[in-house]
Image (cartoon, rainbow, N blue to C red):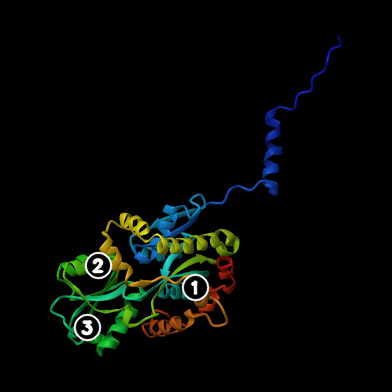
Amino acid sequence: MKNQRIYLPSSPLKLVPAILAFMLSGCFEPPQEALRIASSPWPGYEPLYLARDLGYLDNQNVNLFELPSSDITMESFRNRSTDLATLTLDETLELLHDGTKLRILLALDISHGGDAVLVSPEIKQLADLKGKRIAIVNIPLGIYMLNRLLDKAGLERNQVTVFPMSESKQEKFYLDGKADAVITFEPVKTRLKDAGAHVIFDSSMIPNEIFDLLLVHEDVYLKRKTEICDIARGWFKTLRYMDEHTDDAAARITRRLGVDIDSYAGMMDGIRQPDQEDNFQLLSGNTPGIFKSAGRLQKIMLTEKQLNHAVNISDAIDGSFASCYTK
């Protein structure tokens, strides 16, 4: 029997450079990091957490986390600690003004009573606010609501004393007797009502003026549009689930919020959540519906020196995005 020569491959160590070169050549792509979505406590954002609970968000590609307040969420987005964020229209204008490149993906909700002015029991009418102390949430929305309140009350700014602060501090500030009125939103609104305060003015009296939006950084949008569209589809799928399975959706949401069904129902009474068609009308076409509200808000922000110059919100809108979730 002849001897057979067996050829073995080179030492495995010698193969390492070749393997690395193959990986770096573009034939192998490392997995992308999960998209980070930041939000703050507000019932209008709850469908995001419900979507995660129901499996409508790809938890391998999406990391959803809640921050204590909207101003912290805004700063997280500004410093790029998050890829997407739930923020208000006024915060969006401020970010655009400061040079942040972003896209508005969705109108998550429109406040219809969720943002409110709560006052102590002895205050019966708007005129009674003259000379009173008002705690406002320390974001542009707080100033906007203050302006709309004073307009309705026929008062000037120098006729009230204003205390800006985070919404997380407002309840204690009021309970400590340091404010006669509080401009706030859920869930602080419900807690103050439980403490004896009553609503004297709210966003239902100024309909279609206060929006909550889902934002994404422009470069992230351009690179990962398919995944971002999946998030939008998951959002609308969740809204349909809330309509079709009301009891189960409410049970899941109240469990996460730690409130009872009645409190949750009261919170949801104060907001309206636009469906796919509404979003198309608001964020698409030659003149997106959100332009009118943004113009009114921007005028107040310029007057209040919250903006030094006007911004063009159209720079943040891609009218073609709606086609990915409406088809």
Which label sits in the foreground, 3 or 2? 2
Q: Residue furthest top?
A: 1
| Residue topped by disc 3 | 160
Between 50 and 139, the one nearer to me in the picture: 50
What amino acid type should be assigned to the residue bearing mark 2?
A: Thr
State whether residue 314 appears in this view. yes
Between 160 and 267, the one nearer to me in the picture: 267
Image coordinates for residue 142, horizontal then vertical, percent: 32, 75
Residue 279: mark? 1
Q: Residue furthest front?
A: 244
- The residue that appears at 55% across and 66% down in the rendered structure is 325
In the rendered structure, the answer to whether residue 115 lies left or right of residue 310 reads left
State whether residue 166 appears in this view. no
The image quadrant of residue 248 is: bottom left
User: Is 248 located above or below residue 101 in the figure?
Assistant: above
Q: How many residues crowd around disc 2 within 10 Å: few (fewer than 14), some, or many (20 or more)?
A: some
Q: State the count of labels.
A: 3
Residue 190: mark? 2
2 or 1: tag closer to the N-terminus? 2
In the rendered structure, the answer to whether residue 44 lies left or right of residue 119 reads right
Between 245 and 76, the one nearer to me in the picture: 245
Between 106 and 275, the one nearer to me in the picture: 275
Image coordinates for residue 201, horizontal then vertical, percent: 26, 80
3 or 2: tag closer to the N-terminus? 3
Image coordinates for residue 218, horizontal then vertical, percent: 55, 66
Residue 224: mark? none
Tell me the CA gap for discs 2 and 1. 28 Å
User: Is 213 located above or below residue 254 in the figure?
Assistant: below
